[in-house]
Image: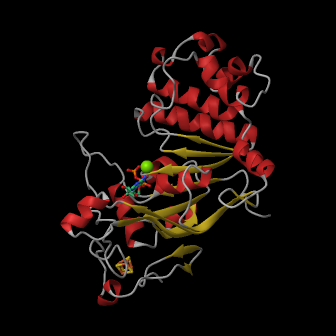
Amino acid sequence: MSALIKVKGLTRIFDVSKPWLNRVIERLPKALLTAVSDVSFEVEENSVYALVGESGSGKSTIGKIVVGLVPPSQGSVMINDVDLATETDAAKVEAVRADIQMIFQDPYASLNPRWRVREIIAEPVAAKGGNTTGLAERLLEQVGLSAADAVKYPHEFSGGQRQRICIARALASEPKVIVCDEPTSALDVSVQAQVLNLMSDLREEFGLTYLFISHDLTVVQHMADRIGVLYLGRLVEEAPRDILFEDPKHPYTRMLFDAAPRMDGFGREVDPPKGEIPDAINPPKGCAFHPRCPIAVERCSRERPEMRDVRGARVACHLAE
Ligand SMILES: Nc1ncnc2c1ncn2[C@@H]1O[C@H](COP(=O)(O)OP(=O)(O)OP(=O)(O)O)[C@@H](O)[C@H]1O
Ligand code: SF4
Ligand SMILES: [Mg+2]
């Protein structure tokens, strides 16, 4: 079976230079930030692929490239064998855009406060001249709210309910793929679990494919079929969920597991992640993780490790056996 999403050699560089005049006066070079570097992975239809990594590792950038909000600097994303960045057939582009939706972290910022929930949910369909009769009411019930909520405004809901509204809107155009960028990070732990369960149920019901972005491995533990771990814009490990959880091979993946929220007797978090995330404009040479790596050897600061197959996973580490 061919994959529904194929990401190949994806790279995105942002120009973060000061304005031209400042650069000339201060004799500064251009500053380029590589947010995503040579990332490749595939997502099978009706599966959940999770991208995990710390803040700034490039997760949202990859999500935005996949839905076509940001163009890649190099590499490609194929959805249903169509590349949104280069496809010239407008009908094909339109079809793929309708097939893919995105849900963001902040459910309030992504809802228009002046619109009623009915308009918000039906908008993607109304914009294309589709039939919206009863659509919002039906979708509200599907996401665990009530049809009567259609006449309310976003501020009348809790955070978890608002994220349900965002999910209902994403479902309105009957997409095949949903890119979920930290959809539950702004929610309380108990509400998080409810929204994640809802998303799992909807995947079954509608045969959806998710690209699920999170900084937290424990959030994706129950949902993901496959997990990619990002560090400073690069994939460092990629494996089916069970293999990653039972046998994490990259020192950074192991560090993420150690840093996963664990409480001590007083409800405080223990084991914060060790070391600073380096500057993405001047990433460390060789393996970008070497300044933080507990097992780094001399070679690590010279030579960047290539991705290779190790015991059912793909790993970029010189010492992974
Ligand atoms: N439009 C932009 N212009 C300049 N730099 C950007 C832009 N978008 C992202 N970046 C930079 O690219 C890097 C990756 O950002 P991105 O938002 O993809 O990270 P992330 O993994 O989603 O982080 P977080 O967990 O904080 O959301 C960061 O260093 C960020 O500052
Ligand atoms: S390549 Fe070296 S520095 Fe990088 S993760 Fe492996 S051991 Fe650590
Ligand atoms: Mg992000």
Q: Is residue 214 above or below residue 81?
A: above
Above or below, 2 against 191 in this view is: below
In the rendered image, which quarter is residue 279 located in? Answer: bottom left
Can residue 144 be seen here?
no
Nearer to me, 56 or 235: 56
- The type of colouring in the image is secondary structure
Q: Position of residue 188 (x, y in %)?
A: 40, 32
From the viewer's perspective, is 186 left or right of 4?
A: left
In this rendering, position of residue 63 left or right of residue 78: left
Position of residue 73 in the picture relative to residue 175 (left or right): left
Can residue 182 be seen here? The reply is yes
Q: Position of residue 88 (x, y in %)?
A: 75, 57
Residue 52 percent location from the top left of the image: 47, 57
Q: Position of residue 42 (x, y in %)?
A: 65, 64
* Placement of 252 over or under 19, stated as above or below: below
Image quadrant for the N terminus? bottom right
Q: Residue at (33%, 56%) from the top-left corner?
A: 259
Query: How many numbered marks have been drawn onto this rendered protein structure?
Result: 0
Above or below — where is 289 with respect to 143?
below
The image quarter in which residue 284 lies: bottom left
Observer-nearest of 140 and 320: 140
Residue at far left of view: 26
Q: Residue 203 is drawn in which quadrant?
A: top right
Q: Residue at x 72, y 34 (%)?
A: 173
